[in-house]
Amino acid sequence: MVLQPLLRVCELTKRFPGLVALDRVDFELGAGEIHAILGENGAGKSTLVKILAGSYAPEGGHIWFRGQTVALKSVHHASQLGIRAVFQELSLVEQMTVEENLFLGKEQSRGGFLLKRRMRERAAQALARVGANVFPSDYVWYLTAGQRHLVEIAKAVMDEPVVLILDEPTAALTSDDARNLFELCKSLKRRGVGIIYITHRLDELYSLADRVTVLRDGRRVVTLPVNGLERSRLITYMTGREFSEIFPVLAPPGHHVRVKVDTLRVPGFLEPVSFEVKEGEILGVAGLEGSGKSELARSLFGVQPGAQGVVYIDGVKIDIKKADPRLMLSRGLVYLPADRRGEGLVLSRPVVENLTLSALAQFVRWGILDKTTERQKACELISRLRAKVGNIFGRIEFLSGGTQQKVMVGKGLAREVKVFVFEELTQGIDVGAKVDLYHFVRDLAARGATVIMVSSDLGEILNLCHRVLVFCRGRLMAELTGSDIREDLVLHHYFGEKMNATEHAVSL
Amino acid sequence: MLRSMRLVSEQSEIGWAGAKAGVRADSVFLKRILSRAGVLPFLMLALVVVFGVLEPRFLALQNLRTVSIQAVYLIIVSVAQTIVLISGGFDLSVGASIALTSVVTGTVLVAVDPDWLGIIKACAAGILVATVIGMINGAVVSLFLVSPFITTLAMMSIASGAALILSGGVPIFNFPAVFSDMLATGHLFWIPVPWLVAGLVLLVTYLLMSWSRLGRYLYAVGGNATAAHLSGVPVKISLFFAYLIAGILTGVDGVMLTARVGSGEPNLGASVPLESIAAAVLGGVSLRGGEGNLFGAVLGAFFLVFLRNGMDLIRISSYVQMVVTGLLLIIAVVADRYTHRR
């Protein structure tokens, strides 16, 4: 099936402080092949493709491109050779138009003057090719996340690459856009382009890919043809565990209504929604990007601009308009943001200071901080969370993602909290830390805390929640309980009334 | 005990990294020192060696004592600057604030009776005016979330102008002799008064920054304001207090400097914004906020003042000294960037 290896890597190794991101990984891509890379967050997928795209230099290993060893010096060098990548973090300049972005760094000019009309025509062609419904003259800040992603893909395809790397391209796309993208991939494949396709959506893998390489904890587990491969085997390869080991068995929720949300709304982002959550209950909030699930979480903590409505915690009424983190914390609700590094932690400060930041008042005696008690509390939290922290006075930025996440959770535990709102709790962390956190969430609920899990991770939604709310474009689409929490139902509501990606993928 | 454990673990880490990286061991070690204490230890060493060799008087006890008293004035304002820098801001108005304090103190001083009460009134007036400047800085920065750079730059112009208007552009003379005798050259329990004032300022600000909730909040706000807000930290109030405290300290510094020069000077402190930032950054305070401590800044200030003294002793002109101060600030900023690269 694979005619000739277009790209081959051997024993590729990359280290980061405190972490081996890639450990002697082999990989091969044929011309006209779509090769999927599958793995949990933190498995090394992004590191591998970043090396192939020239943004990281590997510490060990070799790369052959069209039969010759190459040392990729930079992204620019890689793209000159014909290797182009589209990452999750986009590289568009928001203040510029789509066409200016498409030609950034390769503007066409004559006699020092830009050939604007010609660039606009070519931009329009490139956008049509990826099925992006945007004008070349649109400013990028005006586009949705999905449209931006398509522009980025158009930018890559415009260069007629030999190898195209797509890093979770459908994460931000609507189902229509995703379908266009699949068509594009297939037409590129027919022209002999090799495509490396990173995903953790198994459906996409089955409908598109020829082969799949599974990575776990920086190592290559296996490379197999997709045809005839069982899903359960893939999941076991990915996680290194049987499925049943990952998610704990939940304790039944209580009867007392802990949180009552009454017509909570964010004009333009979230339509009015009302629901209740009981003590000991884990409520999942699912939806795609832009579904309003993140706005819901942030509203509950009083950090979403424009949010209105009322929340009752144990019967105490709180006007969301007037709420802020201080008030919500004093009412016993804590929110842990998805963006750990940007919003959750103060990276330049030691672990201990991060842990106690929201609970400092309890360590103050006569205006002076009681650092001994503070340290004891920090150590206690760290051992409770099984976080691998060598030195609590060390800067937090050097810890692994999973440990950082545990510290962030620890922040929520430092004070009396009855309601936990987690957003993307396990994003970007390794399986071990994930399993720890899952058990931890289960225990929190079993002891009577209320947990609201806002998550894009389908596994979490399906297996760690008593009840699930599914949102789509700012509207509550469905409330699922018990045996109704099934992948097909959740996915169906993910995409609203429209045909969902799974059905589409199967019909191809 | 705990501290020594920490050192051991770091050394072993260095050892590990050294063994792994081979040739990179030196640069890792260098980076460790740099990230702990900035470039200052190296510069201090160079300073002592160079001037000690070139000019024996530099290390004479009498000279060291005199210069240590001179250093007080830069130290206090550098501490003020450091508090604002840690909170993630800047205060460029410190120099103009010192000038206005000086003029106000001088104006009050020549108007009141030359006794204890009169002196206290004059000092209070001076400190009050700097405190108000700090409050305005803090209010504008925290309420409207505008750039502290521009806010305090504008305040610098306002305070400078006010000082020149109030004084008519000429210094205010005829102070009662007791004012300078007390605050500039006086002793209490055989200790020079400037040292006592600096010691008190350092004690209070150390407790504030390292042992109080506000200090912890300022580090958090400077390190990551969003995370601080989401942790329930009152970001705006904390920022306001940073500038307010800086204002009070600047006022104290202004009064002390006025006593030293013996007149109300509308042009006092022109070089202070730059020098105080240079002292703080040399001492390892990050320009991006959330990092550094007061003692680094104090050492930085000592370094700058001793450097100036050394250059004076070997007759380097003050014009050249300005160039040197600027160069040092650039070196410090580059070192800051290199050690805290994210």
Image (cartoon, coloured by chain):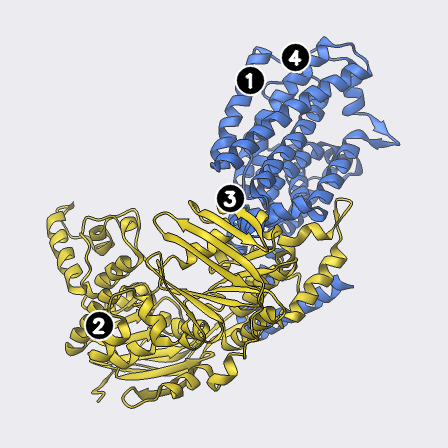
Query: Which residue, given by chain and number where applicable, does mark 4 sit on?
Result: B172
Question: The chain shown in yellow is which?
Answer: A
The amino acid sitting under disc 3 is Ile
Instruction: Determine the image quadrant of residue B267.
Output: top right
What is the drawing colour of chain B?
Answer: blue
Compared with B201, A177 (above or below) is below
Nearer the camera: disc 1 or disc 4: 1
Say which element carries label 2: helix
Task: Please name the amino acid that badge 1 sits on.
Answer: Ala
**Mark 1 surroundings within 10 Å by alpha-carbon count, few (fewer than 14), some (14 through 19), many (20 or more):** some
Quarter occupied by the N terminus of chain B? bottom right
Q: Chain of mark 2?
A: A
> Residue flagged by tag 2: what amino acid is it?
Phe
Disc number at residue B330?
3
- Picture coordinates of residue B195, whole percent (x, y): 78, 34
Tag 1 residue: B162
Check residue A182 in the rendering and tell me which mark sits there, or answer none. 2
- Place residue A383 in its image quadrant: bottom right
Residues B324 and B224: in front is B224
Q: Are marks 4 and 2 on the same chain?
A: no
